[in-house]
Image (tube, grey):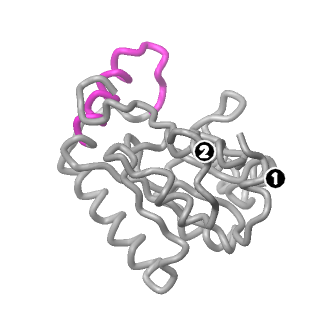
Amino acid sequence: MNESYGTDRSYNKIFNVGLNRAGTASLSEALRILGFRAVHFKIDGRRVYDIWRHNAVNGRPLLSGLADRFDAFSDFAAYGIFEILDRQYPHSKFIVTLRELKSWLASRDRKVNKNRADSNYSYGFYEINHDRWISERQQFLQRINAYFQSRPGDLLTIDIPAGEGWDELCEFLDLPVPNAEFPFRNRLASTASD
């Protein structure tokens, strides 16, 4: 990891605000390689989603207790709160991880089936509903693109499962491309095994 990459920058935080099953783990690892303190999904055994919900209910900034510990956040249901994050953490960068629709739906199907088979799983991702997922995705993309229409430099849409990686990410973050392979996680994105 090159610690110097993420320390001298003109932006505040980095938020992955895309829907799950679209390269969020890969993005988090790439940000770590670039020197950012990145958290993906959970910290200290708690979902980041649960932390920001608790903070919201108690009238605190969404990332209270985390903002001083981390530079980048991924896979925490931020697609529903990106406007609030933008207000509470000004001058931040927002990344939408996206994936080809058919592959994305298949990956979500597999995740739901995995959740159903896990007797310890206690969250709400139990139902396969392609029509709802497609509608939510379309509405989210329309909303976020409209929101950042006058600030295109603050929003990156990247398709990591399709092979996009360092070039797109480093240009967006104004950083040099590191001398390292891009950390594609769940690389078999379009097969039945991710």
Q: Which residue is the site of mark 2?
A: 179
Query: Magenta segment, which residues?
Result: 105-123
Query: Eyeballing the image, is 169 above or below 86?
Result: above
Q: Residue at x 34, y 27 (%)?
A: 194
State the image coordinates of residue 92 (x, y, percent, origin top left).
Answer: 64, 68
As for residue 141 lying within the magenta part, the answer is: no
Going from the N terminus, do you reach mark 2 or mark 1 first? 1
State the image coordinates of residue 141 (x, y, percent, origin top left).
Answer: 34, 66
Q: Which mark is residue 68?
A: 1
User: In the drawing, does residue 89 fall left or right of residue 116?
Assistant: right
Closest to the observer, 142 or 180: 180
Q: Secondary structure at mark 2?
A: loop
Quadrant for residue 103, please give it. top left
Check contact, mark 2 vs mark 1: CB within 8 A: no
Check disc 1 and give the amino acid type.
Answer: Asp
Mark whose residue sits in front, 2 or 1 = 2
As for residue 110 lying within the magenta part, the answer is: yes
Query: Eyeballing the image, is 185 above or below 23?
Result: above
Q: Secondary structure at mark 1?
A: loop
Crowd class of label 2 (few under 14; some 14 to 19; many from 20; radius 10 Å):
few
Q: Quadrant of the N terminus?
A: top right
Crowd class of label 1 (few under 14; some 14 to 19; many from 20; radius 10 Å):
few
Give the dominant element type of the magenta stretch: helix, strand or loop: helix
Q: Which mark is residue 8?
A: none
Q: Residue at x 53, y 54 (%)?
A: 16
Check disc 2 and give the amino acid type.
Answer: Asn
Determine if residue 31 is in view.
yes
State the image coordinates of residue 27 (x, y, percent, origin top left).
Answer: 52, 46
Furthest-front residue in this view: 179
Furthest-bottom residue in this view: 150
